[in-house]
Image (cartoon, coloured by chain):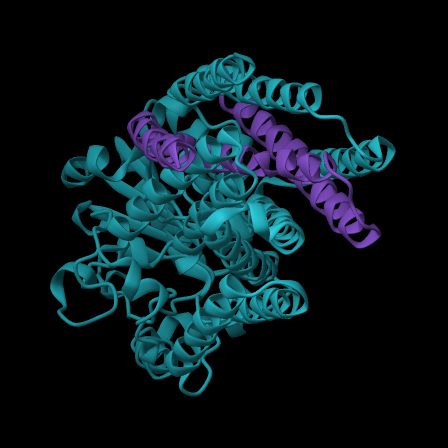
Chain colours: A cyan, B purple
Amino acid sequence: MDTRWHLVIDLVIIVIFFVAMGQFRTPRGARRGNITAAFALLCAMIVVLSRNTLQGPAIVILAMATGSVVGWLVAMRVGMIQIPAMVAFQHGAGGIAAFLISYVELTRNQTDLGVVGQISGILGIIIGAVTFSGSMVASAKLAGIVRQTPTLLQKHNNILATLLLSLAAFGFVASNTTGATLLCASLGLIGLSILLGIIFAMRIGGADMPVLISFLNATAGIAASFCGIVIQNRLLIACGATVAASGSILTHVMCAAMNRSLFNVLIAADLKPATAALADTKNIEASLPSFSIEETTESPAQAPLDRAVEAARNAQKVIMIPGYGMALAHAQFEVVEIAILLKKQGKEVQFAIHPIAGRMPGHMHVLLAEAEADPDILFDLPEINPQFQETDLVLIVGACDVVNPAAITTEGTPISGMPILAAHEAKHVLVCNLDARPGYSGVDNPLYLNPKTILMLGDAKTTLNNLLQALG
Amino acid sequence: MPDILLMVSVFVISFIVGYLLISSVPARLHTPLMSLTNAISAVTILGGILLFATETTTAEKLLGASAIALAAFNVVGGFTITDRMVKMFHRKQPNS
């Protein structure tokens, strides 16, 4: 009877979680959904505490209070550009928690866990630990502590395969022993998994981060689910599964936006273009004679600014394309200011946002929301793409690969077939990038050489401020 | 054994329902969505608490407390950041 009530209460809490997810349709609903989810988690904690008598409640309370206070302080201070690094770090914290719990449960009472519990415990340890170390690498890369470029070891895939095989061997041992051997095997599993996570994540570079971070979101959920099976807690399983579903969707969306498979991004990424990029840069810089002169002399690109102002004055319909470069230059405020100014001058202004712009899914929307951009003029790729043909001016700020027409015209490049924003179809294109180098993909952008393109190279914040002054 | 069946069905049903609900989240809310699910994945804090429901050794207490602290960091941090973000999304637009 008692357990039946427990089941009902658990199901009610799970339904509240689903209601929270269902509210995530509009920004207003999202806020309610967030609060609903927090409420559901609070209920779940109260339920767990009411059903069990704790040994050493003081430690539990102390640990909870410490974690909460630190979490709150960090969350209140973190800037919007650091959100991806922060989220990755939190995935890592969730991963640690999952593997620690799985480890303790597995090693202390394996007799009453049963086969399923044991296997889940082993999987919980592996996935939790991989999520932990992979997230830490991702977070360090996103925070700029480690270089964002991919690091490839010799025989990288062989190392990964060896690690996976060793994990399988250790897992097999762990599932068949007890006592000290089990303890050693579990510790071995943790060590190998942490190593696997590091080696797996280190080869993934800056622009592929949205895929990695979404993938780790999913694995954090799966780790929580396995952890739930070990401790036989339905709430953990359900929540973990929902998170896994969310992470899977985002991973799929990000891969589709790059026209690459998950396997291609995570395992088989062809890293040649990154080195070839240097040679390509020389080519394109050689064909841009004015560029190097402007960079060395003191005068700030006079001619391009005049052309830009003229194009902006004559434009009726303007589309702005922000990229991660805008975030790096902290230029989102200037971008929004220009949008407002142009709108005041009676022009139609829209923003075009590519799904992989930024370092995590939806990152650009958050940055523009921070700068108080009007959400009604932000459009995603499928909605905005047909409109470029009738657009007078496209303003690109810190974006390269997502507007590179080579994705359509050239076969066999890393971005071939990737859906791009059709900036090249507009009458004029104004590029406010740091330099004319290829984007992360290493593929030269022919848009830069197009006569209708005006290049205003340099720090986007400065460039846009100059433009603002000239237009104002 | 029926317990295992129940657990697997909980996983499968939650995954499917979650998948259907989250499929209709618009792209502009994807960052807050990930931040929210990130906080939810720290539901492992329940597991940490449950470790203390039976007699524990000092080492287990230490590991359990670490798990709880990290999960609490994840839960509180995740919900707070999500709230900060979605608040920005629907604040009044003075300029438009």
Q: Residue at x 14, y 68 (%)?
A: A410
* A402 vs B11, nearest the viewer: B11
Tell me if A309 is positioned left or right of A55 in this view: left
Give the quarter of the image for residue A400. bottom left
Residue B30 horizontal/vertical position (percent): 41, 35
Q: Residue at x 33, y 63 (%)?
A: A265
Q: Is residue A403 visible?
A: yes
Residue A461 horizontal/vertical position (percent): 55, 49
A286 relative to B20, above or below: below
* A427 vs A13, nearest the viewer: A13
Q: Residue at x 32, y 77 (%)?
A: A273
Q: Quadrant of the C terminus of chain B?
A: top left
* A198 vs A190, nearest the viewer: A190
Tell me if B66 is positioned left or right of A267 in this view: right
Q: Quadrant of the N terminus of chain B?
A: top left
Residue A440 horizontal/vertical position (percent): 38, 65
